[in-house]
Amino acid sequence: MPASELNRRSFISLCGNAAAGAVIINPVDLFADSDQDPFKLLRSRWIIYENGSYDLISKEIILKNCRPAINGQAVMSRNVFLGDSPKGIRIVYELSGGFLMLDLQTNEDSLSIGTEFSGLSQAPRWFYPISQAQVFGVNNFFRQGLGTGGPSGIFPISTNMPINKDQSGLWQNWTIDSYLSFAFLGKNESIAVGTLDHKDFLQRSTLYSHRHRTRLQDKEEYEEKIFFEAAMQLDQSKIKNEYIKLPNLYFFTGNKPYETIREMAVRTANKSEARKNSLPSYHWISKSNDRENYSFERLQKQIYFLSDKDPLLPVQTIVINRGYCVAGDWLEPDENWPGGLESAAREIFKHGYRAGIWIAPFIVSNKSNLIKKHPNWIIKNSEGQVKLEMADEKETFYTIDPSNDGVKKYLKTVFQSLRKMGFIFYEMDYLEWGLKDSKTVKMDSQDKSSVQILREALNIIRQEIGYGSLVMANSTAFQPVIGFADIVKTSNSCDAGWNEAGVKNMIRETYYSQYFNNILWQNNPGEINITDNGIFSEDERISLALWKAFPGGAVCTSDDFTKMTWEQLEFFRFLEPAKLIQNIRFPYWPSMTEIKVAVKYYNSYNSWGVLFFNDKDVSASKRFPVNELTESDSLYVFNWKPGFIIPFGNMSIINVDLMPHQSRLLWLSLNNDPPPKNLTLGGRITDQV
């Protein structure tokens, strides 16, 4: 329907009241000038004291009276030696039976702490290059969750922080852990903290408070002191030749929080050899919650439908989800796969798709043949009892020991066989089960850290599936899979609904994990639901699909294509990513209030796509200056919908009015050129949209 033929009611229904009523207003009248200063790294410095303590000083932020710590206890050596190093000052602490050396380095664009132990045959369980650091000049901080599901985000340091459960009242204390990345956020500067090399040890940063009660009753708040520590989990691993050098702990200071954290992610990707050059994934995976197990016949039905489309739907990969076998017996599919997995892989491949399969390499069911043959492979708790991981009304699940030599051979055989069958895409689930704290379980290997044990198993898998195969990691800690995974699920499934466990978790983790998207790997916010699943309305499904696809990571669905309408198929075609990686930016990051805004620049058209999303449970209305979204003061604005584009004219202010859970996608053009009708959200030209 041409725009000229739209009546006012239809126009408002499609585009929202605000879009219809958008007007040109001088931005200066409504908003202060936005900060257009370019990102830059700032200089910080060390101050070292003769007793072995030190300070980190920047313009706004101070970490005072820092000390190294071993297993949570500050190192208070009777003998401390100070000297010069190539990049700074070296502090040597004499320990019982050995020495600890800290190298406080001043690099061209950062500070770092190098650590070396000598004279010790066994590493401590935890080592802290920095501990007991009192924090000044910080009102907010960024924390990254351990892995899939977070929780991540920006948090204010306030009396509303989560508290220790054994305390109550105004004097309560709190502790917040962060993994992979942490950042102090000052008024005009930020300091990102973390190691760049994650191949051997888990690194954790912690912010915590100390208050002390001084009266019989809680009648007033007491002075709160904030402290910081950063640790590496060494798991009491053996030290070869009584000498070990740990990864450096880095401190990047910058004038913008997002860019500072992202800069550290870029350095991490380079140091840890991240697989950041994989082509963006656009795939389909069968549903995992069907009442009946999936089958070869149903797989064929899906493939034949896709193959008969004209033009073809350009899905790259077809993935067989869980349920094809008993967990652990990955090469022994049930009766629903009469030709075996090899026939399934061949069927997918001969129709022009990558063959993919879901597998959880460290899971074993009590119903499996594997557990009957090798009960000694199951990880035991610290008391030597078999450790139960998960159970439902039908079966129980355990973890096999990735440090066991027999398990390593088993993993080699499984993945070697799957690769020979033709599978080149692997969704690997429950990888966190392979990362075990040595204090809570008994494993065959006592010489290595938990990260080293897991990564050794993952390296065996990667060798067998080949460098070119794609791995999507799920239910995983982030640090150990850098350099192994091409795609990582960052959030919980949305199936729980529009609540903290489902949609709100996905939105938060997508928002706060974008800084490493297409840097450490492709982020995957989860499967996109286009057909009615009985959980979300049509508006909600569209909003969630756009939010998941727009950031430029993996795009996938588990919807049955055979049940999609023509419009739904075209909408999924519209979500196709580009062949080359293309990130978005959040211009108002880290704000989580009101309407969320994401912006993508389409270089070939000198235009911008802007997604407005009201994820709140109440209506929202706001005016956005174009010069806060793009580099121009005014642009030509179009409503952008597959096959349906409406011009709004030249604007300097965009007025957005959204109902709860509603979104609006606009195209902003410098030359009054609308988006091509067959342009996808990712920036590709397709045969038909």
Image: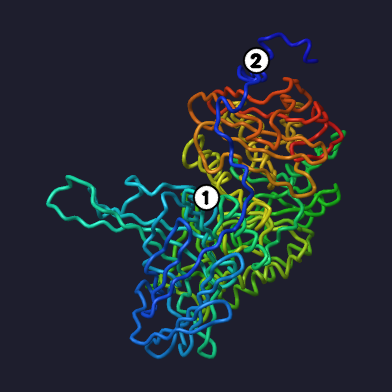
Q: Which dot marks residue 206?
A: none
Q: Nearer the viewer, residue 305 or 458?
A: 458
Relative to 25, is 465 on the left or the right?
right
- Which amino acid, mark 1? Gly
Q: Nearer the viewer, residue 279 or 214?
A: 214
- Which amino acid, mark 2? Ile
Q: Nearer the viewer, residue 157 or 296?
A: 157
Q: Is residue 632 above or below residue 227?
A: above
> What residue appears at the point 56 percent right and 75 percent down from the top-left corner?
403
Q: Is the C terminus in the top left, top right, bottom left or bottom right quadrant? A: top right
Residue that label 2 marks: 12
Q: Which dot marks residue 149?
A: 1
> What residue appears at the point 48 percent right and 25 percent down from the top-left corner?
618
Q: Is the N terminus in the top left, top right, bottom left or bottom right quadrant? A: top right
Tell me if I can see residue 374 in this picture: no
Q: Are dots 2 and 1 in contact, CB under 8 Å?
A: no
> What residue appears at the point 69 percent right and 14 percent down from the top-left corner?
11
